[in-house]
Every structure is written in structure tokens, then in C-alpha cells.
Image: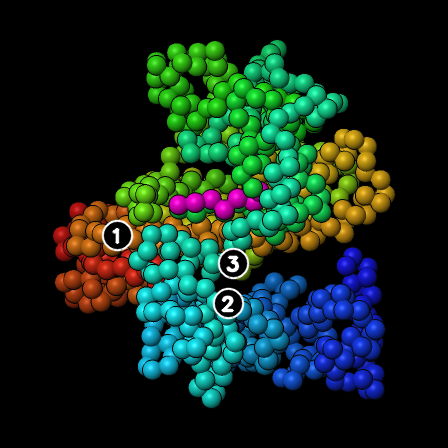
């Protein structure tokens, strides 16, 4: 249903609700009054759901709809494992705080109606849940535990779903204690009556100790689609794996231009190639991106699958791709020595890092070498003679790439671009999915070259289409909230640092200066993390409001159409523009479509990030399970009233509970962020190196517990 028809249906239903003649009515009764055909019932349900969430209508326990009282506020409830929660209301800057006693029957991700209440000393506005309008979660993944005769329980993996789910034996599907299962919730229970949620098991994933079941549980818990539809797979199978003359017609032929891909050793979806030549004081940089849109047409089965997925998801032992392997690892992958279709952004860059000229074109390319980050690092950083000899014809180009990347980075730094250099985690797993090593991911000269070149292309494309004033999809990052900004400023003040804030605004350069000041200090890890948390999350929008973190006015995602849907959508717009097909009708089409793409892409990106983060946390716990009793050295990364968090060199973090710190009774000094012994005055400070012993792990909460060895290092 298009947007115009959708809005018209909403108006009709609202008008109908104002008439006492028909109120209240069930969905079926509404369909009869509206003369909706059977095939239109799904559309009617979508309209009713939208009106419920907007608070224009309500639905009673009998499933009857009526006009809503307009007094209450409505939003999504976010539950905290501590028992309290928050309600996010669209259009309002600050969430409402829901105290534990006011949560009632609301559960994580429910859409609720709330009423404001007077606060009890907190700064955030408090509210109480009045009514659950729509349940946000209908299925849960968890561990089955057999109860008494005729029933069992499922303990949810998701810590935000706080209640066990009662399972009658006839709905257990034969599960036994220790099985990981998927549960469909049939009854959400009643807090006042002490009735637990109830459900039925729809799928048994395997036993908790079976290889791969841990990751599968996360996949199911986040409802990540694994299998492609039959239509999408059939469509992929019909795509030729060869480039014909007809495919190349009208394209700029760049097959004789020397170019390479630079990726990790295990990468298979190679969607970006780079070329560079230096001439007359200018760098001529080419960023060539796989033309995925040539194979994935809008509204096709493949496109519908890609839209729902939004992004490829990279988990510890597998990748859940946005597109079938025949495309992502085949015809759309820029493999060496084969012709490939591309969309190229070619830039003329001066010695100050300024893009003086550029062109965008549909091209046909042929990559010369499939390089790895390790190999390019050996050539440039390690001066490895064997590697330099192997790729001797490309060594001059790599050296020029290193030069240009340094220039681009210097330019970004000058304008205030913020670079959080947190060590990412690299997991090494055996054939059964068990981690045998965990270490920081190597961010070297080669990874930085690709980062800098992709950023340059993304900025150039975004600026080009901004000035054309055409419908487009931008990657935006808003300035930090005033309250979070002031909290951070107060926090760093205690360490002797300052940030210049003018008229409740801050320039990204102030963040950059702070990160430079704290580099190498004991408090670096903590302040860096808190600085990152003070910022908003980047997202996809149709309005170009700039990117705060990169300190640039124009930014988009153009460089990864194999694994990100926004990039694929942008490619379609670019090609329509290049081919002169952006008619008024096409522009109107994109104006209606792009807000949906922006929201879906932002939502699926969040989902993927959370799933990837949970996977890493789980594998860290599994790794340390095998090392209980062992001692390690680490750095105190943060201190709270309940304990000390210690980070090991391999990025694993664990907590020493305040009650387990030996030798004294310790209390947390909030002013100085220290743990101080009352009798001895002994202190533990941020950035201090300590020796710890692993004393426990918990897979359910994804936590690791340390004991502190008495002697400090």
C-alpha cells in the first residue's frame, strides 16, 4: 500500500471511530463496514497497528477498537535488568524513567501508554505504565528446565526479559532439561495475580553444550533471517556468472587501469577495489565499487530479502549474508583477473588532501591482485623483501597510497574528525566453534589506507548529490545532547581536563583534543569510553545534517552494496541520475521510499551490532571458562561502587566485586574515581596494572569474575 492510500485509510478509520453508531468494533466488523476484501485484511491490520501506536485508537481485551482518550503519552518501553525501565517517545529528546514499582505488566520492547508522575529526587522525568498497547516480543530463546509432573520452564537468554516462561508438558515438544529452545509466548501473564507468562516450544535448537548451539541461540534470539526464500534463490541461480558484451555496453572501460583489492585474509565478498597514480602534483584516486544494483533489481525477490536483512551479520563462526553467496562471493565479488561491473568514483586530489575534481561513472574493471592487509603491511611497514619482490610492480603504487592516506588523515584531523582507536576483538575458533585464542584486531597501515580512501569516496558522493538537491540517503551523526555533554565535562574536570563549550554547543575538535590529551594516561580507557557514550548513534536519514564524529558536512555509505542495503539503494539513485532517468515520477517514488529504507537500515544495523557484540561476549566467557584459576595481568579500566573492572591485553574484561578486594573494607570515592581501604588507606586507581585470578564465569549473563591477587604489580 502506498503512503497516500495508507494515510487516507487512517483518516477514514479515525472519522469512523468518532461516530457512536459503530463503536466499539472488532477488526472483522471494521472490515465489513469498510467493505474491505479478504486480501485487504492485512493492509487494514497495518493501518490499525499504526493508529494504535500513534495513540489515536485503543483496543480492549475483547479485541474491540475505539477512539482513544488523548491524555496519555505513548512510546516503546525499554526494560533494564535492574527491574526499572525507560519509555522512548518519538519526537521527544529525553526518555521517561519508569521506576521498578511502576513497570507493572510491561515487558521489553512493548508499546505502552504512560502517565507522568512526580519524581523522587532524580533528574529524569518519571512515569507509570498505564496500559500495554502492543507487545514487542512474541518469541523468546532460552534454556528449558523440567519442573514437576506435567510442566517445565524456559529461562530466557535475553536479560531484558526478566520472567521465566511456564511450559505445559503437552507444549514442550519433548524438550529435556538443558535444551536450547524457541518459545512462542501465548499468554503474557499478570503481575498482580502472580501469573507467569506462558508459552509453547516451537523449535528445539539442540543441547546447551552442543557445538554451534550457542551462536544459533543468538541468531534466533535476534530473529536474524538465515535461509533465503525459494524465489530469491531461484532468481540468484538464473544470474549468469560471466560478463557479456551486452553487460559492458555504455560503460567506461577501466580494465587496463592497474587496481587491487585490499581485505582481510578470510574475506570473500570483495566489493571495493582501489587504483592510484600520482602525476603533476596530483593524486588520481579511483574507488571502484561492485555494481550490485545491476543484479538486484528494485522490488525483486532478491531486493525484498536484502531490504528485510538490511545488512550482512558477522558472527564468531559464520556470516549471515545480505545476499546469496552466488552474488556476494561470485559475480558481485571483485575477484582478480576477471571482468566485473562497477560504479566508480574517480577523484583528483591535491597535496593538501582537497578533492579538486571528480567523476562518477558506470565502469567495467579487472582487478589485478587480491591483496591482504597483512601483505600490504609487510610491504610498507615491515619492508619485507620477499613480499616486496612478489608484488614489485605494485610497490610504487602502495607507497603513493600510504602518502595520500596520510595526507587525507591529516586533513580530517585538522578539521576535528574524532578517531576512537579502541582495540577490536579477533576470535580464533576451532572446528567445534570453541575459542582457542582471543587477541586485539591489528589496525595497521593497510587498514588505514582503505578506511581513508573509502571515507574520501563517501564524502565526495554525498556532497555531489547534496548540491543536486535530489532524494538521497545520507549517513548522519548528530551533535551530542546538552545534558550528556555537560555530564562528560563535569566528569573530566575531576581529572584536570577541560572542553570548550559555547552556547550549549561543542565542536568535534574539542573531543579530538581531549582524546589527544588523555593518550597514554591511566584514565585513557575510561574517558574514551565515556566520551563515546556521550555521543549519539549515527543513522541513515533523508535529510543531510552532517556527520559530527567525522566533522564533515556531507557523508553517505556508498562503498559496500554487497553487505549494506543503504549502499545498494544509493547505487540505484546514482545510476538513474547518470542515465538521465530521474523523472518527476521517479523522484516522487524515491521521496516516498527512502524514509522507509532509512528506518529499516538503521534498525537492522542496530540489531546486527547487538548480535555481534553478544557473540563476542559469549565467546570471551567460553574462553575464560577453560582458564578458571589462572592468573593474568590487566589494567583497571573502570571503577564503580560495586567493583573494579579489569581489562586484559587480549580485550577480555572481568569484574572484581568490592566485597572480594582483600586486606580491608573498601569504599568507592566518586570524586577521585578510586577504591579506597577505610583502615589502611590503600587505593586502587584507573589505569593501574594489577594481577588477577579468574574465579568464575556465567554464560547466561555473559560475565566474567576475577579475584584480585594481594600483591599489586
The image quadrant of residue 708 is bottom left
Q: Is disc 3 placed on a helix, strand or loop?
A: loop
Please give the label number shown on residue 223. Answer: 3
- Residue 635 location (% of width, % of height): 27, 48
Question: Which residue is rendered at x = 76% and y = 80% of the image?
Answer: 29
Q: Label 1: which residue?
A: 624
Question: Which residue is rendered at x = 70% and y = 21% of the image?
Answer: 245
Magenta-colored span: 317-323
Q: Is disc 1 placed on a helix, strand or loop?
A: helix
Q: Label 2: which residue?
A: 139
Residue 277 seen in this snapshot: yes
Q: Residues within 10 Å of mark 3 (few under 14, many from 20)?
A: some
Mark 3 vs mark 1, CA separation in Å:
28 Å
Task: Judge from the rendering whether residue 593 lies leftward or rightward of residue 77; answer left or right.
Answer: right
Mark 2 vs mark 1, CA separation in Å:
30 Å
Question: Which residue is rendered at x = 76% and y = 52% of the image?
Answer: 592
Q: Nearer the viewer, mark 3 or mark 1?
A: 3
Task: Judge from the rendering whether residue 367 lies leftward or rightward of residue 168; answer left or right.
Answer: right
Q: Nearer the viewer, mark 2 or mark 1?
A: 2
Amino acid at each position: 500500500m502506498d503512503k497516500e492510500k495508507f494515510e487516507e485509510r487512517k483518516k477514514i478509520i479515525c472519522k469512523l471511530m468518532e461516530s457512536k453508531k459503530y463503536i466499539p468494533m472488532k477488526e472483522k466488523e471494521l472490515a465489513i463496514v469498510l467493505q474491505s476484501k479478504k486480501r485487504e485484511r492485512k493492509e487494514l491490520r497495518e493501518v490499525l497497528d499504526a493508529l494504535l501506536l500513534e495513540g489515536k485508537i485503543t483496543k480492549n481485551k475483547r479485541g474491540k477498537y475505539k477512539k482513544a482518550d488523548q491524555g496519555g503519552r505513548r512510546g516503546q518501553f525499554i526494560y533494564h535488568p535492574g527491574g526499572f525501565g525507560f519509555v522512548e517517545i518519538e519526537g521527544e529528546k529525553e526518555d521517561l524513567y519508569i521506576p521498578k514499582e511502576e513497570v507493572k505488566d510491561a515487558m521489553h520492547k512493548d508499546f505502552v501508554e504512560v502517565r507522568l508522575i512526580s519524581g523522587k529526587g532524580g533528574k529524569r522525568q518519571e512515569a507509570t505504565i498505564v496500559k500495554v498497547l502492543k507487545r514487542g516480543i512474541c518469541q523468546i530463546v532460552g534454556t528449558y528446565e523440567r519442573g514437576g509432573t506435567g510442566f517445565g520452564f524456559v529461562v530466557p537468554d535475553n536479560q531484558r526479559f526478566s520472567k521465566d516462561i511456564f511450559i505445559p508438558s503437552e507444549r514442550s515438544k519433548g524438550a529435556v532439561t538443558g535444551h536450547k529452545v524457541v518459545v512462542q509466548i501465548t499468554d503474557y501473564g499478570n503481575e498482580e495475580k502472580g501469573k507467569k507468562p506462558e508459552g509453547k516450544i516451537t523449535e528445539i535448537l539442540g543441547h546447551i553444550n552442543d557445538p554451534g548451539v550457542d551462536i544459533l541461540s543468538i541468531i534466533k534470539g535476534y530473529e536474524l533471517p538465515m535461509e533465503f526464500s525459494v524465489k530469491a534463490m531461484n532468481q540468484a541461480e538464473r544470474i549468469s556468472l560471466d560478463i557479456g558484451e551486452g553487460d559492458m555496453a555504455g560503460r567506461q572501460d577501466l580494465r587496463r587501469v592497474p587496481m587491487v583489492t585490499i581485505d582481510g585474509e578470510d574475506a570473500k565478498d570483495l566489493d571495493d577495489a582501489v587504483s592510484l597514480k600520482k602525476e603533476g602534483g596530483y593524486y588520481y584516486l579511483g574507488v571502484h565499487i561492485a555494481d550490485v544494483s545491476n543484479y538486484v533489481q528494485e522490488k525483486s525477490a532478491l531486493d525484498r530479502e536484502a531490504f528485510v536483512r538490511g545488512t550482512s551479520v558477522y558472527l564468531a563462526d559464520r556470516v549471515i549474508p545480505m545476499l546469496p553467496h552466488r552474488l556476494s562471493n561470485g559475480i558481485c565479488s571483485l575477484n582478480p583477473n576477471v571482468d566485473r561491473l562497477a560504479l566508480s568514483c574517480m577523484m583528483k586530489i591535491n597535496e593538501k588532501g582537497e578533492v579538486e575534481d571528480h567523476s562518477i561513472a558506470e565502469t567495467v574493471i579487472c582487478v589485478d591482485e587480491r591483496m591482504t592487509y597483512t601483505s600490504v603491511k609487510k610491504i610498507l611497514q615491515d619492508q619485507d623483501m620477499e613480499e616486496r619482490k612478489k608484488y614489485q610492480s605494485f610497490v610504487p603504487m602502495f607507497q603513493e597510497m600510504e602518502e595520500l592516506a596520510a595526507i587525507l588523515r591529516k586533513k580530517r584531523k585538522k578539521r576535528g574528525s574524532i578517531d576512537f582507536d579502541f582495540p577490536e576483538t579477533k576470535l580464533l575458533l576451532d572446528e567445534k566453534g570453541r575459542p582457542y585464542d582471543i587477541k586485539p584486531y591489528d589496525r595497521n597501515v593497510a587498514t588505514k589506507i582503505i578506511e581513508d580512501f573509502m571515507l574520501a569516496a563517501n564524502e565526495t558522493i554525498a556532497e555531489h548529490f547534496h548540491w543536486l538537491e535530489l532524494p538521497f540517503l545520507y549517513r548522519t551523526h548528530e551533535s551530542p545532547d546538552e545534558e550528556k555533554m555537560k555530564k562528560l565535562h563535569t566528569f573530566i574536570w575531576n581529572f584536570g581536563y577541560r572542553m570548550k563549550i559555547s552556547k550549549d554547543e561543542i565542536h568535534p575538535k574539542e573531543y579530538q583534543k581531549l582524546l589527544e590529551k588523555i593518550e597514554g594516561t591511566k584514565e585513557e580507557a575510561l574517558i574514551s569510553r565515556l566520551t563515546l557514550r556521550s555521543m549519539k548513534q549515527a543513522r541513515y536519514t533523508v535529510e543531510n545534517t552532517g556527520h559530527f564524529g567525522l566533522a564533515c558536512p556531507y557523508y553517505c555509505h556508498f562503498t559496500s552494496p554487497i553487505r549494506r542495503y543503504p549502499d545498494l539503494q544509493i547505487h540505484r539513485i546514482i545510476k538513474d541520475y547518470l542515465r538521465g532517468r530521474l523523472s518527476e515520477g521517479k523522484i516522487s517514488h524515491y521521496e516516498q521510499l527512502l524514509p522507509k529504507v532509512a528506518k529499516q537500515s538503521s534498525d537492522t544495523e542496530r540489531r546486527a551490532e547487538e548480535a555481534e557484540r553478544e557473540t563476542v561476549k559469549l565467546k570471551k566467557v567460553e574462553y575464560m571458562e577453560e582458564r578458571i584459576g589462572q592468573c593474568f595481568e590487566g589494567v583497571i579500566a573502570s571503577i564503580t561502587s560495586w567493583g573494579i573492572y579489569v581489562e586484559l591485553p587480549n580485550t577480555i574484561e572481568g569484574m572484581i566485586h568490592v566485597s572480594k578486594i582483600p586486606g580491608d573494607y573498601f569504599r568507592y570515592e566518586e570524586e577521585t574515581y578510586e577504591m579506597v581501604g577505610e583502615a589502611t588507606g590503600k587505593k586502587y586507581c584507573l589505569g593501574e596494572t594489577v594481577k588477577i585470578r579468574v574465579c568464575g564465569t556465567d554464560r547466561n549473563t555473559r560475565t566474567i569474575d576475577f579475584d584480585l591477587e594481594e600483591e599489586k604489580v
